[in-house]
Image: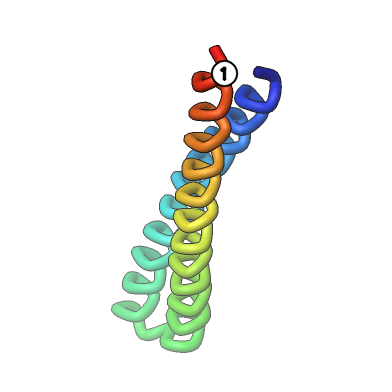
Amino acid sequence: MNKRFEMLDLMRTIANGLIGVEVMADYMAEVSAELDAAGDKDAANVLRMLARNHRVRFLELQGQLAAASVDYASLRQGVDGEA
């Protein structure tokens, strides 16, 4: 049963990471738009690139969470099947 709690903790950590990465991506995109409007194209481009990188990281974390969820379901099914 300890392994199940470890998996739940991992999934919770990944889910929290998803939130943080998405918030950062949104913020960087917002600031890049403001910089672009102010005429600072170079800084806007850098922030747009960083926002895009965070969006990619978000997708990677979603995949990790999905994989961990499948592993957890298998683990849970094995434990519940023994009971």
**Callout 1: helix, strand or loop?**
helix
Q: Which residue, as the protein is rendered here, is positioned at the far left? A: 37
Residue type marked 1: Glu
Vertical arrangement, residue 43 with respect to residue 14, above or below: below
Q: Is 43 in front, or is 24?
A: 24
Residue occupying image coordinates x 51% and y 62%? 60
What percent of the width, then of the height, locates residue 69? Answer: 48, 41
The C terminus lies in which quarter of the figure?
A: top right
Q: Could you tell whether 77 is left or right of 9 in the image?
A: left
Vertical arrangement, residue 36 with respect to residue 54, above or below: below
Residue occupying image coordinates x 33% and y 73%? 33
What percent of the width, then of the height, locates residue 30? Answer: 34, 64
Q: Which residue, as the protein is rendered here, is positioned at the far right? A: 2
What percent of the width, then of the height, locates residue 4? Answer: 61, 25
The residue where tag 1 is placed is 82
What percent of the width, then of the height, locates residue 41? Answer: 42, 87
User: What colouring does the structure picture have?
Assistant: rainbow
